Amino acid sequence: MKNEIVTKLSLLPPVHEAVNAAANDSRISQVYNINEITWAVRNALARARQIIMDGEDCEDWKSRSGLTAWVLEEALTELKELGSTLKKVVNATGVILHTNCGRAVLASQVADYVSRLASNYNNLELDVRTGKRGSRYNHVEELLKELTGAESSLVVNNNAAAVLLVMNTFARQKEVIVSRGELVEIGGSFRIPEVLKAGGAILTEVGTTNRTWLKDYKEAINSETALLLKVHTSNYRIQGFTHSVPLQELVELGKETGIPVVKDLGSGSLIDGSEYGLPEEPTVQEAVKAGASLVTFSGDKLLGGPQVGIIVGKAQLIEQLKANQLTRALRVDKLTLAALVATLQLYRQKDITKIPIWRMIAKKQEELFVEARKIKDRIDDIINLEAEVMPAFSCVGGGAFPMAELPTAVCAVKPKERSCRDLENFLRQGRIPILTRLYKEKVVIDPRTLLPGDEDIIVSRLKQWPEAHNNSQDNYRY
Ligand SMILES: *Cc1c(COP(=O)(O)O)cnc(C)c1O
């Protein structure tokens, strides 16, 4: 009996061998990273050891390969359970900041840095020189100063929180003047009038939907006015007979009257997108330079970082924001802060091609044609599918640059018998959901938003189509 246990234990593969085997199993390696795999394999090995020690039924564990196979199945089961409902998806839609898919993808350097910080203690609120308590905001303060030109900064949970905090700090029970053309709704849950109200401010609307003039603001100012707010109408455009007041003019009025001017930039880019064929939009630096007292923007839109709200501007006003109790409730956690610091470092190094969203924006149509053709060549022989490469347009998404069309090339797929809807469902309901777009009665795969490894996932899922093709809806899942 004892001998049998020793023999069985000696058949267990070493960790590195089992990890290698798992890394060669596409069911595992396409979905999980090496840390997750190592973790699950170790657990599975520990369980196998326990089963052997307990003398439980493991009759057919007669070879190393048999045991390794068991370990892989066990690891996969554990990984799937851990995977829960929140998981990787393949974004083949060509929408770069896809709100349903977590907006900006972080750079891999950023993700590595976050992961290292997460599994170690850190100096989040420690001044290592003195050993005394420090501020978590210090870690980004210098970077933001350098990159935006602002005197000071504060980071909160998201841009909605940033606007809320500004209102609550400076405009409780006071009036905030906003142009009627800028009372926008973003993403269904952020509406300027409602955020103002939630912050305790009283909204004073001026001008009309299409035209607002400086005198409209001037006439509305009274002793109760706390702020002049200018909102970037990120996700829509009014064209034709329009007028809005440039930030500089509003800043002049603010100076004359002693009322701070706040600019909600929304997408808040540090880069001039017009170099990449995007329409001209004010950068954060320009808004600061124009003299806005405070500028607010998101971290996970055109900055390409984590979900945060960044407030930059006059030091004295930032101090008041920091003193507000609400700041504690809206504060960012260490992992988010780590991701922001690392993203800003990439801007400082001036290597924006390391930032995935800018790499995607910058991709040229010629390159995309090559990538789309590569996908087409790999799926050409799949029966019941027809594939072709055609030009199309990608978009930035996330409410940024609503009118901008980025010329792209897509691999357009059409099922021979079933409908495009069926194919689109089939792709979305695989182990790794693949999101596509319907365009010109075809299911299109836009290589612009694909990340390393995604192409393999798409090709292997499409290869399962001929089988699913003849079956019912239920067989889409596996
Ligand atoms: C996106 C956006 C917001 C909301 O920002 P979140 O970071 O999503 O909270 C607010 N204002 C404008 C103008 C925006 O574009």
Image: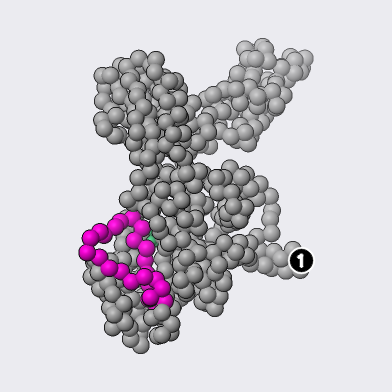
* Nearest the eye: 278 or 51: 278
- In the rendered image, residue 410, in percent from the top left (x then y), is placed at 37, 32
**Considering depth in this image, is 284 or 152 the residue closer to the camera?**
284
Residue 469: horizontal and vertical position, in percent?
A: 32, 19
Which residue: 41% across, 66% down?
A: 264
Location of the N terminus (image quadrant):
top right
Q: Is residue 239 magenta?
A: yes
Q: Position of residue 453 (x, y in %)?
A: 52, 30
Q: Is residue 129 left or right of residue 70?
A: right
* Ligand 1 falls in quadrant: bottom left
Residue range of the region highlighted in magenta in the rendering: 226-251
Asked if residue 382 is positioned above or below residue 275 in the image, the reply reads: above
Where residue 196 appears, x then y in whole percent? 36, 70
In this rendering, position of residue 28 left or right of residue 237 = right
| For residue 437, above or below residue 322 | above
Camera-side residue of 304 and 334: 304
Tell me if residue 194 comes above or below residue 217 in the rendering. Answer: above
Residue 332, above or below 371: below
| Picture quadrant where residue 369 is located | top left
Query: Can residue 198 be seen?
Result: no
In the image, 84: left or right of 438? right
SS label for mark 1: loop
Front-most of residues 213 and 204: 213
Magenta run includes residue 257: no
Please say whether residue 238 is visible from this viewpoint. yes
Q: Dividing the image into 4 quarters, which one contains the C terminus?
A: top left
Q: Amino acid at mark 1?
A: Arg
Q: On the image, which quarter does residue 2 sit in? A: top right
- The residue carrying mark 1 is 129
